[in-house]
Image: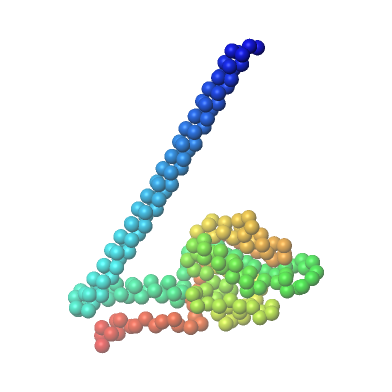
Amino acid sequence: MGKNQHFVALTLICVLLGVIIGVQYNTVKKQNSLTENQRLTELTATLKKVQEENKALENRLEEKEKIMKDYENGLNYGATLTNLQSEIEQLRAFSGLTEMLGPGVIVIMNDSSTKKGGDSNAYLVHAEDILSVINELNVAGAQAVSINGQRIVATSSVTCAGSIVMVNGERVAAPFEIAAIGDGDILQSALKFPGGVVDNLAPWGIEITIRKEANVVVPPYTQTVLFKAPDLEQEVVG
């Protein structure tokens, strides 16, 4: 092969490399552009959602301020009273002072029936195990939760003294029945996803069963009255 042929071959290789590099550059550039556009679209959608939520909160605040102003000025007293009573009922439900009924899941936790030696306490359901389940349910959107009939609220305590579990200061024993109201599919998935709480307790033989139900009953919190709603009707009469 002569020098000219070598030169032509080298030129063709350089041209081919140039074309390949150009194509790759354009491809990367387009991908980056698509990624930036997608990210911008996501951020725009998020911003719009936040703005809508902020607007809704502003409207709700204005509505409540008007109700309070009417109440202070003695205007539209009947409607104002009805609104205030509705707010009180919502607060009672939010605080766990009313019974709730709805779709959800029932989770049964029981001590291991097949102990394999070592520390026997490791095969028992402890407070931290129950709290792990409750935390997952709350993160998954549970609207109300109870343990063996004890309603879980913001001030609730779940503690362990040896093999004894205390909920709201009351002694509860295995099997532990946790009732949760919410989307049954989501609640169940939150507990059973790979590496989740069910998988973490499986090596110790802790028995956990989860079943979805159309009507789950969660009783009210009864240990301590967090607040007492004023008797508005009595105030009107008086």
Q: Quadrant of the N terminus?
A: top right
Vertical side of 12 occupied by 44: above or below: below
Would residue 210 be found to the left or right of residue 214 on screen? right
Vertical side of 198 occupied by 22: above or below: above
Would residue 161 be found to the left or right of residue 55 on screen? right
x%, y% of residue 215?
51, 63
Point 43% across, 39% down: residue: 33
Q: Quadrant of the C terminus?
A: bottom left
Point 55% across, 23% down: residue: 14
Q: Quadrant of residue 227?
A: bottom left
Vertical side of 83 occupied by 161: above or below: below
Point 61% across, 78% down: residue: 159
Q: Quadrant of residue 233?
A: bottom left
Q: How many marks?
A: 0
Extreme residue in the front direction: 3
Extreme residue in the right direction: 117
Point 63% across, 74% down: residue: 127
Query: Is residue 78 in sight in this rendering?
Result: no
x%, y% of residue 154?
49, 75
Q: Nearer the viewer, residue 97 or 158?
A: 158
Would residue 147 be found to the left or right of residue 90 on screen? right
Query: Is residue 200 in sight in this rendering?
Result: yes
Would residue 55 be found to the left or right of residue 105 on screen? left
Vertical side of 76 occupied by 214: above or below: above
Extreme residue in the bottom direction: 238
Q: Nearer the viewer, residue 154 or 75?
A: 154
x%, y% of residue 12?
56, 19
